[in-house]
Amino acid sequence: MSLKPEQELHQIKKLYELLSPCFLCPLNCGARRLEGERGICNASQRVKISSYTLYKGEEPPLSGVNGSGAIFFSHCNLKCVYCQNFNFSQYGKGHFVSVRELSNIMLDLQSKRAANINLITATHYLPQVTAAIKIARDKGLAIPIVYNTSGYESVRVLRLLNGFVDVYLTDFRYAFNEHAVKYSSAPFYKEIAKEALIEMYKQVGNLKIGKDGTAVKGLIIRLLLFPNGLKELEKILEIISECVGNRVHISLMSQYVPVHRAKEYPEISRKVTKEEFLRASHLLRKFGFTNGWLQYG
Ligand code: SF4
C-alpha cells in the first residue's frame, strides 16, 4: 500500500508524539527522551546504529541474490540473557546517525542492489526511522521495507507503521510469560506478541514473492527453538494457528547458542539437539504448517 504524503506525515507526527515521554514499545516506560532521559532500552533521542551491510544470512526470499540491506540498530527494549548481539543491543555499541544520514544509508543499500531494507530491532527509533523512509522514498527508494522484530510491539505503534512496512519478519519467542520475564525481561509477552501478530497479519497478509524470487509483501514468523523448548513451541504453534491460520510462512531455527548470560540458566545453557529439531519439525506438520523454512545447523 502506498500512502498519500499527508497520511505519511500524519503517521510520522503521531510516532514523534510517542517519543517523549516515550511510549514506543510495550514497556511504556515514559522516559523523557527529548530532555535527555533514557528509558529501559537505554536509547537516547538520537538514532544509533551498530552497522549496515548486505546480509545473505536471512531466509532466501529476503536475502535474494545480493543480500538483504540490513541496518542493525543499537540498544533494545528486551534484555535477552542469550542475545548474540549483546554488544550493541545491550551495551549500546555503535555510532549516531541523523535522519538524513539514515535515509542515505537506505539509498546506498539500494544502489548496492540490496533485495530490501531490513530494519533490525528499530522499535525505539520508529519516529526517526519512518521519517528517514519517507525522505528516501521521495528520493527514489523503491525496494521493500522489512521490519525485523522480537514480536514485542504495541498495536497502536504498529498501526502507525501501516504503509511504511512491506514485510513483517517477527519472532514469536514465548508462550509462557514466566520465561519471557526470566530470559528477556518482557512482561505479558504472550498477550502482547499475539495482538501484535494479528495486527501485522491484518496489514500485510501471507507472504507474496515477486518474479525475481524475493519477498514483496507479507508476514514471516521466526521461531527460535530453545533447548528443552518443545512444550513451549507446541503452545506457540497453537497460538499462531488460532491467530493467523496455518498458511503463514514459518522459519524454524536451530541456531540458538548459549552466549552472553545464558550459562547462568542451566536449562538453556546448551545448543538444541538434532532430535529436538526433528521433533519440532514434526510439530509444525502436526499443526499443518507447510510454508516456510527449516534452518538447521
Ligand atoms: S522504547 Fe525504550 S524508552 Fe521507549 S518505552 Fe520502550 S523501553 Fe521505554
Image (cartoon, helix red, strand yellow):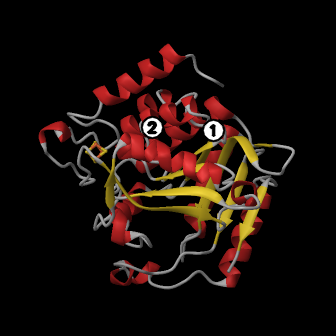
Q: Residues within 10 Å of mark 1 (few under 14, many from 20)?
A: some
Location of residue 103 in the rendering, given as x and y in whole percent from the top left corner? 47, 42
- Residue holding disc 1: 243
Along the viewing direction, whichever of 24 and 282 lies nearer the viewer: 24
**x, y (%) of residue 13?**
36, 23
Q: Is residue 164 left or right of residue 285?
A: left
Q: Of residues 62 and 261, which is closer to you in this image?
A: 62
Q: Residue at x 71, y 61 (%)?
A: 66
Task: Point out the image quarter for the N terminus.
Answer: top right
- Foreground mark, 2 or 1, reads 2
Spot occupied by residue 40 in the image (x, y as percentages of width and height): 23, 52
Depicted 54 relative to depicted 202: above or below: below
Ligand 1 closer than 8 Å to label 2 CB: no
> As drawn, is 11 to the left or to the right of 273?
left
Specify which label sits upstream in the sequence, 2 or 1.
Answer: 2
Q: Mark 1 falls on what kind of element?
A: helix
Helix, strand or loop at label 2? It is helix
**Residue 132 disc label:** 2
